[in-house]
Amino acid sequence: MRRKWIKYVIRGFATLVILLFILIAVAEWMIGSGVRNSIQSAQSHFPGKRVDALIALVQCEPCSLENKNRAVWALGQLDDPRALPVLEKYYTGKPCNHRTTICQEKLRIALRHLRHEDQNRFESVLWRWMLQADS
């Protein structure tokens, strides 16, 4: 009886581990796809290297706030230090006003990523293979 119980516990644990890896893989794929889509959108308006195009989109006055917010998120995910001064310029720390300014919460999170304040941040390493070489 005890062997059966141990066998079920081991199978249950193995199933949970497999499900966890599947969930992580799906989340990584979604993050990578989102970053890639943000880059493609930015490069369609501002040709050039991905970080330069995303920075240009954040600074673009007539561009929509939705596109700017996506660019801020993507810059945080890419973890490129060139984005730090630009994002700091737009961060006020005040409550968000999504009708008139870039989302302060997205800026705060992106800045935490760029300043390496997130101790347990590992996800960006896993989806980098999705991005083509930056030419």
Image (tube, grey):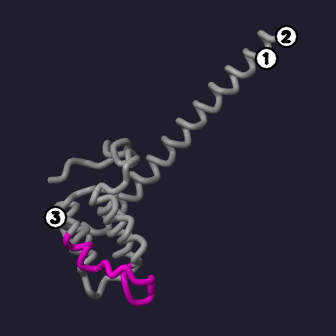
Please identify the residue farthest to the right as the structure is shown. 1
Name the residue carrying label 2. 1
> Residue at the location (34% across, 76% down)?
68
* Image position of 78 (left or right of 133): right
Q: Which mark is residue 69?
A: none
Which is in the foreground here, disc 2 or disc 3? 2
* Image position of 51 (left or right of 120): left
Tell me: residue 64, above or below residue 131: below
Q: Position of residue 5 (x, y in %)?
A: 79, 17
Dot 1 and dot 2 residues touching (CB under 8 Å): yes
The span from disc 2 to disc 3 (Cα, nearest Å) is 66 Å
Tell me: residue 132, above or below residue 20: below
Which secondary structure, mark 1? helix
The three-letter code of the residue at mark 3 reads Gly
Tell me: residue 79, above or below residue 28: below
Which secondary structure, mark 3? loop
Q: Which mark sits nearer the N-terminus, 2 or 3?
A: 2
Check disc 2: other Cα within 10 Å, few if <14, some if 14-19, many if 20+: few
Image quarter of residue 46: bottom left
Check disc 3: other Cα within 10 Å, few if <14, some if 14-19, many if 20+: some
**The magenta stretch spans which residues?**
85-102
* Image position of 52 (left or right of 33): left
Dot 2 and dot 3 residues touching (CB under 8 Å): no
Q: Which mark sits nearer the N-terminus, 1 or 3?
A: 1
Name the residue carrying label 1. 5
94 in the magenta segment = yes
The three-letter code of the residue at mark 2 reads Met
Check disc 1: other Cα within 10 Å, few if <14, some if 14-19, many if 20+: few
Name the residue carrying label 3. 48
> Residue at the location (14% across, 53% down)?
135
